[in-house]
């Protein structure tokens, strides 16, 4: 399959679940409308795609795949909340996202703030609900929640905002990106395995496949971010669906500003190579890694 075919299949799998995250009798609420506007605005659905790839690589029953879908929609809600809040004037102040006007441009800042809050709260409700129904999912739910917080995305965004206009070194940039972008990608790559195996934290720490998936996620996260930084300087809003040149405008430290465009390109190739090495370890354990290889190749050259 090509990445385009994966993306199409992921959309068909995910979209009906996204349509059902808010009850039918709540659809007239303005904050629900704003949340659905952003959820349905498109986006590459890369995190759900990764969740599907992990589930297919590990192999699972239809019942488990339905639960992976439930968590994939939940992760997409957390990701979309972060984009809505990041686009607000108090943060990145952007008017274009996923090729459409940002949530606050359509619904105003107050409702857009609430829409982000609602998406995050509803995501947490969903994670609790599944864990109550199936205690084997407790750690998976905790992991997804934790990776969105201070040890994950919010922590990374906090370092990012605090670093604007300051000179930061590569080490802090790694920490920032590992948390801000990497943590949700880690949730995408690893959580399906926790769900399928029903792992506890203690079991997950000792499980060889879980450790390999975490390594894979780390290289995917870095590759994704480095390519994002390169696209910010060399792409076009009409292709990217969001404004470009923002990192320079906001004096942000990125892999391009710290390593130069060529240096960032080389680092990207190294991360792709490392991801493929982890895939060969997974292959040796008997997993079919061909589909993941298609994603890794796409990450190196993606243009949006
Ligand atoms: C507000 C807590 C909080 C966090 C915001 C995600 C984020 C943190 C900021 C977005 C700014 C940014 C450029 C982040 C790095 C890369 C990234 C996450 C890009 C967006 O992800 P894509 O490309 O988006 O997967 P789509 O729209 O395709 O889903």
Image (spheres, rainbow, N blue to C red):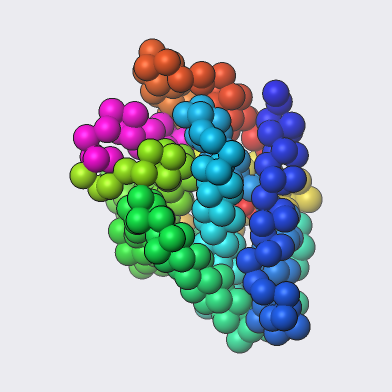
Secondary structure character of the magenta stretch overall: helix
Residue 203 point in image, percent of width and height: 24, 40
Q: Position of residue 1 (x, y in %)?
A: 70, 23
Residue at 68% x, 64% y: name it: 20
Q: Is residue 209 magenta?
A: yes
Location of residue 255 with respect to 95 vertically, above or below: above
Q: Is 104 colored magenta in this rendering?
A: no
* Magenta segment boundaries in residue numbering: 203-222
Q: Between residues 267 and 248, which one lies in front from this camera angle?
A: 267
How many numbered circles does the render carry?
0
* Residue lying furthest top: 284
Is residue 87 placed above or below 287 in the rendered structure? Answer: below
Q: Kindly indicate the quadrant of the structure image that contains residue 88.
A: bottom right
Residue 13 in view: yes
Q: Quadrant of the C terminus?
A: top right
Q: Which residue is at the front of the view, 106 or 133?
A: 133
Residue 149 position in % (x across, y down): 37, 64
Please state which of residues 276 and 16 is positioned toward the viewer in this rendering: 16
Residue drawn at (69%, 45%), measured in percent from left and top?
13
Q: Is residue 107 above or below residue 71?
A: below
Which residue is at 63% across, 66% downward?
21
| Residue 114 vertical position relative to residue 101 in the rendered view, above or below | below
Q: In the figure, is residue 38 to the left or right of 221?
A: right
Q: Is residue 166 visible?
A: no
User: Which quarter of the rendered image does ligand 1 occupy?
Assistant: bottom right
Q: Could you tell whether 172 is left or right of 18 in the image? A: left
- Image side of residue 81 versus residue 149, left or right: right
Would residue 62 appear left or right of 30 to someone viewing this image?
A: left
Residue 77 x/y as whole percent: 57, 62
- Residue at the spot 52% in from the left edge and 62% down from the top edge: 78
């Amino acid at each position: 399959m090509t990445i385009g075919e994966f993306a199409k299949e992921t959309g068909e799998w995910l979209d009906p679940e996204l349509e059902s995250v808010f009850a039918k009798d709540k659809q007239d609420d303005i904050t629900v409308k704003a949340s659905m506007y952003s959820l349905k605005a498109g986006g590459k659905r890369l995190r759900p795609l990764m969740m599907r790839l992990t589930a297919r690589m590990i192999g699972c029953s239809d019942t488990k795949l339905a639960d992976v879908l439930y968590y994939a929609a939940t992760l997409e809600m957390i990701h979309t909340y972060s984009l809505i809040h990041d686009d607000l004037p108090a943060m990145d102040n952007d008017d274009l996202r996923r090729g459409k006007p940002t949530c606050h441009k359509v619904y105003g800042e107050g409702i857009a703030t609430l829409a982000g809050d609602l998406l995050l709260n509803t995501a947490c409700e969903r994670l609790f609900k599944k864990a109550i129904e199936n205690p084997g999912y407790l750690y998976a739910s905790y992991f997804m929640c934790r990776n969105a917080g201070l040890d994950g995305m919010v922590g990374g965004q906090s370092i990012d905002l605090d670093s604007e206009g300051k000179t930061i070194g590569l080490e802090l940039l790694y920490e920032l990106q590992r948390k801000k972008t990497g943590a949700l990608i880690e949730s995408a790559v690893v959580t399906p395995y926790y769900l399928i195996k029903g792992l506890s934290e203690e079991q997950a720490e000792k499980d060889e496949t879980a450790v390999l998936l975490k390594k894979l996620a780390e290289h995917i996260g870095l590759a994704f971010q480095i390519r994002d930084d390169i696209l910010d300087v060399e792409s076009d809003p009409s292709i990217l669906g969001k404004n470009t040149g923002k990192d320079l405008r906001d004096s942000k430290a990125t892999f391009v500003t710290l390593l130069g465009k060529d240096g960032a390109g080389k680092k990207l190739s190294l991360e792709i190579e490392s991801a493929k090495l982890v895939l060969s370890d997974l292959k040796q354990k008997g997993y079919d890694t061909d589909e993941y290889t298609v994603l890794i190749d796409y990450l190196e050259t993606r243009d949006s």
